[in-house]
Amino acid sequence: MEWDWGFVADIMPTLLQGLKLTLIVTLLSAVVAAVLGLGFAIARRSANRNVARPVAFVVEFLRGTPLLVQLYFIFYVLPDAGILLPPLVAGVIGMGLHYATYTAEVYRAGIENVPKGQWEAARATNLTMRQTWVHVVIPQAVPPMIPALANYLIAMFKETPLLSAITVLELMNQAKSVANSSYRYIEPMTLVGAFFLAMSLVSVVILRWLERRYGRLGK
């Protein structure tokens, strides 16, 4: 099969629309993962076992099951319980929850690296627990974590094709739709690979910059 530049020009707007949605899903999922991951990490450190143990179980359960299974459960099983979510929302929640379990471990490691003297100094100055977290612990713990968190952002971007299983019209799903309707696969699939490669290379450059800027803070 020969490469058809005219066909490429015809399908490019559709693929770019899919790429746009892919980036949106990735960024929204990253926000969910970052916020929930921090909540999971803090909850697992709770002195109350009734809080720490259930959260630990949820984290390990989500880490131990495939993302695709979780996406199917959210989109296809929850409607049986009366919870019907749009594909995009289900995808963001599924990816966000799944990766929150990984970011939680990154946060936990960062928090544990904060010197105990900082906690003691916060107590000595009569800071509340909230003030200790907001003004003392998190500002010191987060910067060294940024390179690791950026790695998970890249991984999330590369796993967005799984969302085609729940009918999200991301890049891969758009390419499959174009290919199935035209019976031409070489152009859309090659372009999908090129888009993912280009975005991954850009992400690697950004990651290296983050490592140089923030990685040394963890030493």
Image (cartoon, grey):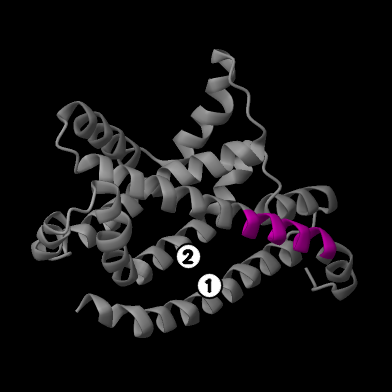
Q: Nearer the viewer, residue 216 or 96?
A: 216
Instruction: Kindly check if marks 2 and 1 are in contact, taking CB atoms under 8 A apart as contact.
Output: yes
**In the shown orientation, is residue 167 left or right of residue 143?**
right
Packing grade of label 2 (10 A; few <14, some 14-19, many >=20) is some
Q: Is residue 65 magenta?
A: no
Q: Residue at x 53, y 60 (%)?
A: 157
Q: Which residue is mark 2?
A: 154
**In the shown orientation, is residue 146 left or right of residue 21?**
left
Give above or below for 5 relative to 118: below
SS class, disc 2:
helix
SS class, disc 1:
helix
Q: Which residue is mark 1?
A: 200
Residue 3 is drawn in which quadrant? bottom right
**In the shown orientation, is residue 65 left or right of residue 192?**
left
Q: Residue at x 69, y 54 (%)?
A: 21
Give above or below for 121 relative to 104: below
Q: CA distance from mark 2 to mark 1?
A: 7 Å
Instruction: Residue type at mark 1: give it.
Output: Ser
Magenta stretch?
Answer: 13-24
